[in-house]
Amino acid sequence: MRGTRQTVLAILTILTILMPLHAAAAERGVIIGFHKQPGASEHALLHGLGGKLKHQFTTIRAAAARIPEEALAKIKANPQVAYVEEDAPIALVEPLSGSIEEDNSWGVARVGALALHAQGNFGQGVKIAILDSGIDATHPELATSYRGGVNLVYPESPDSPADDSWDGHGTHVAGILAAADDGSGVVGIAPAADLYAVKIIGGSGSGTISDLIAGLEWTIANQIDIANISLGTNAPSLALEQACQAAFDAGVLMVAAAGNTRNSGGAVQYPAAYAPVIAVSATAPDDSAVWIAAAGPKIELAAPGGNIYSTVPGGGYGVLTGTSQAAPHVSGVAALLMAAGINDLDGNGTADHRDLRLQLQQTTRDLGNPGRDDTFGFGLAQAVAAPQMINVRLSRLKGRIEESLGIIDLAAGRYEIRIANDSLYRIQIAVFDQAGYRADLSESVRFRTKAPTAAGIPLVTGEGLFKVVFVPEGPINGFADITIRAY
């Protein structure tokens, strides 16, 4: 009995000694903004207060760390520190599962991607990063487009950004973007684009704002063209907003899911709500809004997001619904437009991602209330490659009229035809689609004087490819200059 008592006392003594080790002060994950780029003195401050550095950011003056609760007040009061905010959780914009009710890739056709595919444009040479739960790079539909990436969730395996989410979220997004055009399964919007997996979400479906910031910095360092972000948070973050601005300033076009928040207030989540980011809502096969999709003045574009059939880990396929599926439709359209060539739409002398964003806004198909609205933004994203200011001199040549025709091929979209007439009497504009002559789109423009005159004619086409034929009428060698431009 005495031996038992001594044994119990010994155990209690050991527990008393060890207890402080196990009852250490609680820590909190924070993002600390500094007045200058953090260096040795800022790191010393963190370590001196018992902090553990998680991420040292390079594009913003901040660092992520875990700090003991009792040290937070000292950190906030330090003159080196500009702000301290919670390293709040982010989560995948979790979609709803569904069943196949439409063609396997109805969204690809709805945004007009097939018309550009027919012209040989598959998004070649465009680098797209998917900031998500990873990608199953062994999936037959994705193996040819996958180019690597980074794992920011498990630093011990930085080169293995595999998708371990329960619904294959990142792999599903990847298939919408770039599934192979191989005649089976599904086809992506930009199947020849280069895909990079930036894993910032673990198998649980959640991560942190600091991981998202680190992912954005990876896109900058690796000269990514388009970053697809099908995740979000309700917590605003100055550090995240600064990181988004830094990425945009570096030339990264960011496309983010607006959120599946309609049944909880409907507010657009972050980072989609930040100005440098394109916020995307979701549409159903009948072009109505998906009922769970966020709405509000931050919505910039809409895209197919209802019952989307795409790739999932293990070589299979699945159907999901939500703004997570809509965002990669816009990213894919952006890739096609980039591959087609960007025009200097803002007139600043440089054709870049800012012009690409303008083109996405200007070539939508309007849905809902006329103009921009809180449900669809500017409208449904369309893969309308803006012509490189197509200029045609239409002349009435001597000989058969067929020798004087001007013939232009156009993808679906909205165009303006500008005619600067010198000496023609009339120009017939005949429009044909794959089914034949389209009287509803064709025009006849008559010039009542022999003096030079100008005319502007809108041309709005539906889905598919179109041939526009200009027929000049007038004296031999009479001519007019024609300019066609998407708007």
Image (cartoon, rainbow, N blue to C red):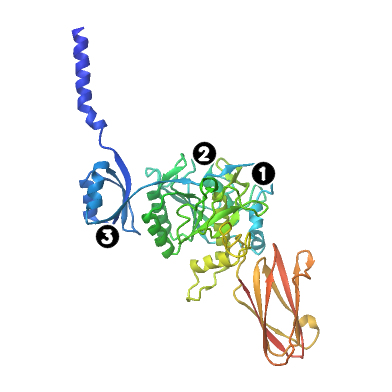
Quadrant of residue 429 in the image? Answer: bottom right
Task: Tell me where residue 395 appears, x and y as whole percent.
Answer: 72, 86
The residue tagged with tag 3: helix, strand or loop?
Answer: loop
Residue 166, disc: 2
* Left-right relation of 79 to 60: left
Q: Amino acid at mark 3?
A: His
Q: Amino acid at mark 2?
A: Trp
Say which residue label 3 marks: 35
Residue 100, disc: 1
Instruction: Single out the residue that lies furthest toward the right.
Output: 400
Task: Tell me where residue 112 appears, x and y as whole percent.
Answer: 65, 60
Q: Nearer the viewer, mark 1 or mark 3?
A: 3
The residue tagged with tag 1: helix, strand or loop?
Answer: loop
Q: Disc 1 to disc 3, how far (Cα)?
A: 53 Å
Residue 380, disc: none
Q: Which residue sits at x=61%, y=59%?
A: 380
Task: Tell me where residue 407 appears, x and y as whole percent.
Answer: 72, 76
- At label 3, counting other C-alpha atoms closer than 10 Å, the crowd grade (few under 14, some 14-19, many 20 or more) is few
Residue 45 in view (yes/no): yes
Is 70 situated above or below 330? above
Task: Tell me where residue 49 appears, x and y as whole percent.
Answer: 22, 45
Q: Observer-nearest residue: 410 or 363?
A: 363
Residue 174 in view (yes/no): no
Instruction: Single out the residue that lies furthest toward the top.
Output: 1
The residue tagged with tag 2: helix, strand or loop?
Answer: loop
User: Contact (CB < 8 A) between labels 2 and 1?
Assistant: no
